[in-house]
Amino acid sequence: MFLFSETFIIPILFISITLVAVALANHYSTKQKVIRKLSKLPAKRISSLKTNVFSRITGKALHIKEPLIAPYSKRKCIFYSIKIEQKKNSGKSSVWRVLVKEEKTQDFFIEKGGDFVIVKPIQNPKNYISHLVIDKRVSSGAFNDAPLKFEALLHQYNLKSKGFLGFNKQLRYTEAIIEIGEEITVAGIAKWKSLKEKIEGYNYSKIVELESSDNQKLIITDLPNIKSKKRICL
């Protein structure tokens, strides 16, 4: 009876611990943190934003200056995040080692119904948390040569798709961007400011900037359909 119980209890405990670990990792992931924080904020109209109130806005991302260019897809954007990894085998196990992890962003507008908000992310020290949806994946492996476009990208980062003996390395690339005109959601502390330079199509002398503070970072994401637990504020 003891042996029978032990035979089943140990695998069940192992599975339970694994499921708990996965659930905790998911709960504390950046994606879930962003969703939890944004779901607590009501969606607001730009014209209704109040100074010094942490607020959430959804609208189209527009560039202020010359847009960034995504490394692989070459699309114009105001934010991109890329990662290049190589699979390394060690005995019976394997792990993906990060070779390149790069994130770039710039000041941008959010436009909604003819109204504008300015957002100014800072990378060092970082004043925002973000989650971008991956919209480009590329890989290579033993029987899968790296596409020419991927080869060019690897060369840009001083990497090669083949090893010392000429065999393909097992590589993978992910790219997530906020494209010009893409609908995104941003939350920050609203500050009404006098407009120094005229914005085409915008006829007001003041504009809102969403800012961060020591205790509250900006939140930036292109995740769609984040439901708010509070009603929209007009």
Image (cartoon, rainbow, N blue to C red):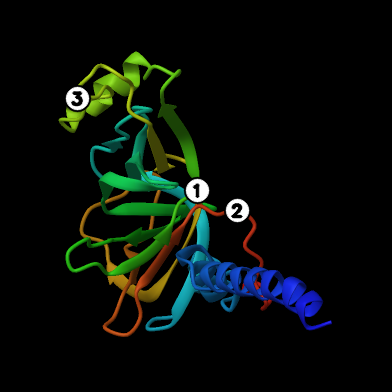
Q: Residues within 10 Å of mark 3 (few under 14, many from 20)?
A: few
Q: Residues within 10 Å of mark 2 (few under 14, many from 20)?
A: few
Dot 3 and dot 2 residues touching (CB under 8 Å):
no
In depth, the one of 139 and 4 nearer the eye is 4
Which residue occupies 55% across, 67% down? Answer: 26
Q: Earlier in the sequence, mark 3 or mark 2?
A: 3
- Mark 3 or 1, closer to the camera: 3
- The CA distance from mark 3 to mark 2 is 34 Å
Does residue 63 show up? no
- The CA distance from mark 1 to mark 2 is 9 Å
- The CA distance from mark 3 to mark 1 is 25 Å
Q: Which mark is residue 155?
A: 3
Query: Would residue 59 be found to the left or right of residue 175 on screen?
Result: right
User: Which picture quadrant has residue 233?
Assistant: bottom right
User: Which picture quadrant has residue 141?
Assistant: top left
**What kind of residue is marked 3?**
His
From the image, tell me which residue sits under label 1: 133
**What kind of residue is marked 2?**
Pro
Dot 1 and dot 2 residues touching (CB under 8 Å):
yes
From the image, tell me which residue sits under label 2: 224
Q: Earlier in the sequence, mark 1 or mark 2?
A: 1
